[in-house]
Amino acid sequence: MRYKGQITLRMIDRDYPYQVEISVPGSGLGSGLNVMHEFCIHLDYKTRGIPTKQRTATGRDGMRWCFRAVEDAENFRVKFGGERPMTKPPKSRGPLRINRSGSH
């Protein structure tokens, strides 16, 4: 169930298309997670889990660090490792169309 104002995974993928996927061991990331968050403190980012289908196909758990800027995602990947998953580029809404005929 989604609550009003809650950010969905689709919204994250749309607004933060540059992503880095980090594998999470069974014991978790420990203090490494804090280091990652500290690295991102001044960046525009969100985190999310990896898709269930992918998790079961690869047999591993993980999380995605999602950024608005490609440079931020690449700097994060260089520092912490991980992979850049294939994500769809944000859809363009195209030009604004105005109906001048007066009918709706």
Image: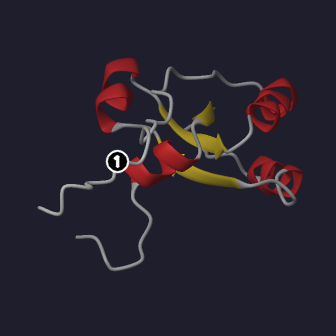
- Near mark 1 (Cα within 10 A), the count class, few <14, some 14-19 or many ≥20, is few
Task: Judge from the rendering whether residue 99 lies leftward or rightward of residue 37; answer left or right.
Answer: left
- In percent of width and height, residue 101 lies at 19, 55
Of residues 74 and 48, which is closer to you in this image?
74
- Give the residue at x 42% y 42%: 93
Whether residue 24 can be seen here: no
- Coloring scheme of the render? secondary structure
Residue 28 versus residue 89 in the image, above or below: below
Per the image, the residue denoted by label 1 is 97
Q: Quadrant of the C terminus?
A: bottom left
Q: Residue furthest left?
A: 103
Task: Judge from the rendering whether residue 33 lies leftward or rightward of residue 14; answer left or right.
Answer: right
Dot 1: what SS? loop
Residue 23 versus residue 69 in the image, above or below: above
- Quarter assignment of residue 72: top right
- Give the residue at x 38% y 30%: 55
- Quarter assignment of residue 4: bottom left
- Give the residue at x 74% y 51%: 33
- In percent of width and height, residue 71 lies at 82, 32
Q: Amino acid at mark 1?
A: Arg
- In percent of width and height, residue 20 lies at 64, 32
- Give the residue at x 79% y 47%: 32
- In percent of width and height, residue 43 lies at 81, 53
Residue 73 versus residue 36 in the image, above or below: above
Q: Residue furthest front?
A: 101
Whether residue 88 can be seen here: yes
